[in-house]
């Protein structure tokens, strides 16, 4: 079950809102290309299990005027590596995702962002049971769609706040695999498919001038689904386990953007609080977007 939770935590780690993915887009902005690196550490499970991950995401998009604002449409690809470890588990995973997105920036400060991604994740694990180390591996496919809306409101000529709402829906496929100790076959494991639905409401409060911006963020998130099911069978003996990853938690952090010629640098650092299932100890993001 811990590797299934590790898989879910990695799936969440690859999720990104508009500011994490592309920095400070604006109405009247240019077409461009961007790249960002990201990583984090989390804890989950009953031991607990520590998860670490890092990845790179790249994208390219075209900007067109629309309704007084600007519509950015583009393509993104990413790759991620991670690990999950506790006293009885040593696991690793790799993931590749491809997606298309559209981001509309209105002239009055409103924006709407949507991204659809499809990818594959492969997992390898060594688990210790009764003093014997068993190894196994499997791969799953999955997809994700996220929609985010926000509206930037000026407080003074430099200070602003941006209320936001986001809905993120994803599906991770089922997998069957056999744990082995050398030439000895162990239990046959069946992981059920997982559907995840996360809602987020939050805000950014920041300061901006002609060189860039700095901001604080706070959000409340709720996982509505994420029910995990696993069956382990060895000979005529089988064990069924179910685990609900439904949870509510807060996310808080700080970030910046910086304009340098035709390039926008951007970064963010965040944590979660109050989570019972997957606790994000830290999550960092650093990217650059170049207009052309």
Image (tube, grey):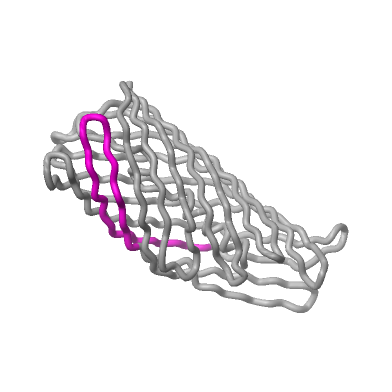
Left or right side of 65 for 88 = right
Quadrant where the N terminus is found in the figure = bottom right
- x and y percentages locating residue 288 in the rendered image: 40, 31
Residue 6 lies in quadrant: bottom right
Relative horizontal placement of residue 228, taking residue 67 as reference (left or right): right
Height in image: 53 above or below 232? above
User: Which residue corresponds to the image point at 22% horizontal and 50% vertical from the top-left?
Assistant: 162
> Is 206 inside the magenta-drawn segment?
yes
Q: Which residues are magenta?
A: 194-220
- Picture quadrant of residue 104: top left
Residue toward you, 94 or 203:
203
Asked whether, in this view, residue 190 is left or right of residue 10, the answer is right
Residue occupying the point 16% across, 40% down:
158
In this view, 292 is above or below 15: above
Is 271 drawn above or below residue 44 in the view shown? above
Where is residue 160 drawn, in percent x and y?
Answer: 18, 46
- Is residue 90 covered in magenta? no
Residue sitting at 32 percent across and 36 percent down?
Answer: 257
Instruction: Examine the image and state in which quarter residue 209 appears.
Output: top left
Q: Position of residue 156 (x, y in %)?
A: 12, 44
């Amino acid at each position: 079950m811990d590797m299934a939770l590790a898989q879910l935590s990695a799936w969440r780690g690859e999720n990104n809102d508009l500011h994490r993915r592309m920095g400070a887009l604006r109405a009247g902005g240019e077409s461009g290309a961007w790249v960002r690196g990201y990583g984090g550490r989390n804890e989950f499970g009953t031991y607990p299990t520590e998860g670490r991950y890092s990845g790179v995401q790249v994208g390219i998009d075209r900007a067109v005027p629309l309704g007084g604002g600007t519509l950015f449409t583009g393509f993104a690809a990413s790759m991620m590596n991670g690990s999950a470890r506790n006293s009885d588990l040593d696991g690793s995973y790799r993931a590749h995702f491809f997606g298309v997105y559209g981001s509309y920036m209105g002239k009055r400060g409103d924006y709407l962002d949507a991204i659809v991604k499809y990818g594959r994740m492969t997992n390898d694990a060594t688990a210790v049971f009764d003093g014997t180390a068993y190894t196994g591996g499997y791969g799953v496919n999955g997809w994700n769609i996220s929609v985010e809306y926000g509206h930037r409101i000026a407080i003074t000529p430099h200070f602003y706040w941006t209320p936001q709402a986001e809905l993120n829906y994803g599906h991770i496929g089922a997998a069957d695999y056999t744990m082995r100790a050398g030439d000895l076959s162990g239990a046959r494991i069946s992981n059920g498919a997982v559907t995840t639905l996360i809602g987020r409401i939050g805000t950014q409060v920041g300061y901006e001038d002609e060189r860039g911006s700095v901001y604080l963020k706070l959000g409340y998130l709720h996982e509505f689904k994420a029910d995990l099911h696993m069956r382990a069978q060895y000979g005529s003996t089988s064990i069924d386990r179910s685990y609900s990853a439904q949870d509510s938690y807060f996310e808080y952090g700080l970030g910046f953007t910086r304009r340098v010629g035709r390039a926008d640098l951007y970064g963010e650092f965040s944590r979660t609080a109050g989570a019972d299932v997957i606790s994000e100890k830290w999550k960092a993001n650093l990217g650059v977007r170049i207009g052309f």
